[in-house]
Image (cartoon, rainbow, N blue to C red):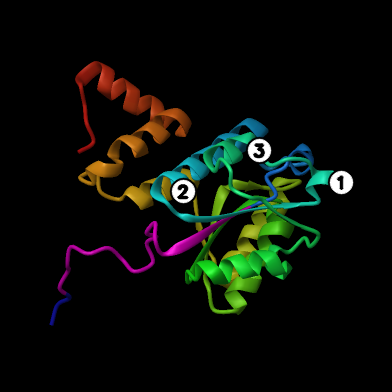
Amino acid sequence: MPLQATATPGPTLLKPQDHTLILIDFQSQMAFATHSIDAATLRNHAALVSRAAAGFGVSTILTTVAEKSFSGPMFSEITEAFAGQAMLDRTSMNTWEDAAVIARVNAIGKPRIVLAGLWTSVCIVGPALSALAQGFEVYVIADACGDVSAEAHERAMQRMVQAGARPMTAVQYLLELQRDWARGETYDMTTGIARRFGGAYGLGIDYARAMFGAHEG
């Protein structure tokens, strides 16, 4: 008997209410030594992910390492999106070994974890492998992460994927949360984020609207 297709989304696609986003160590000291992605692009992707999560009401944890003594403040692009939200500062390189972060993860109670931050090979690999070992589904926003070299970033991504993590990109994250242009309540927000932070995609939206009055829906 042939397979019967249905107009339903696949179970591994993210929804705003089914995951916790953890933004890790987007701090100046960590960014200074990041060379796998340029700083402007990294900050832009961090802003896009943050605005998407805030706009769709995604449960989000902001965490830093040694903020006062060494690594400096979290990127303003993130803190502006989550104005007033407390930062969880750690001493551990592995976020998953911090009791305050884990208490927050458990309080939120979502089965999926989405990670982004610096550096990929240390501060993202640690929680990714730890969460996977405890039965969570893990997604990593690859172009909202960075490392001291392209080699370090790529080997870290490979290691996480081999362990079962699912890689994605910043724009993919935004559009996966929207998923249907007929969802009018978040349409303007999604296209607004894309226009501001979506690079060439955002320029394309502006062009289509200005020249042809085009509309995705």
- Choose the circle earlier in sequence order: 2 or 3: 2
Q: Are marks 2 and 3 in contact (CB under 8 Å)?
A: no
Provide the residue designation for mark 2: 53
3 vs 1, front mark: 1
* Residue type, mark 3 in image: Phe
| Whole-percent x, y for residue 92 in the image | 79, 62
Provide the residue designation for mark 1: 69
The total number of labels drawn is 3
Q: Is residue 172 toward the left or the right of residue 70 in the image?
A: left
- Choose the circle earlier in sequence order: 2 or 1: 2
Provide the residue designation for mark 3: 75
| Whole-percent x, y for residue 3 in the image | 17, 75
| Whole-percent x, y for residue 41 in the image | 59, 34
Task: Name the residue: 42% across, 51% down.
Answer: 57
Give the Cα distance between marks 3 and 1: 16 Å
* Residue type, mark 2 in image: Ala
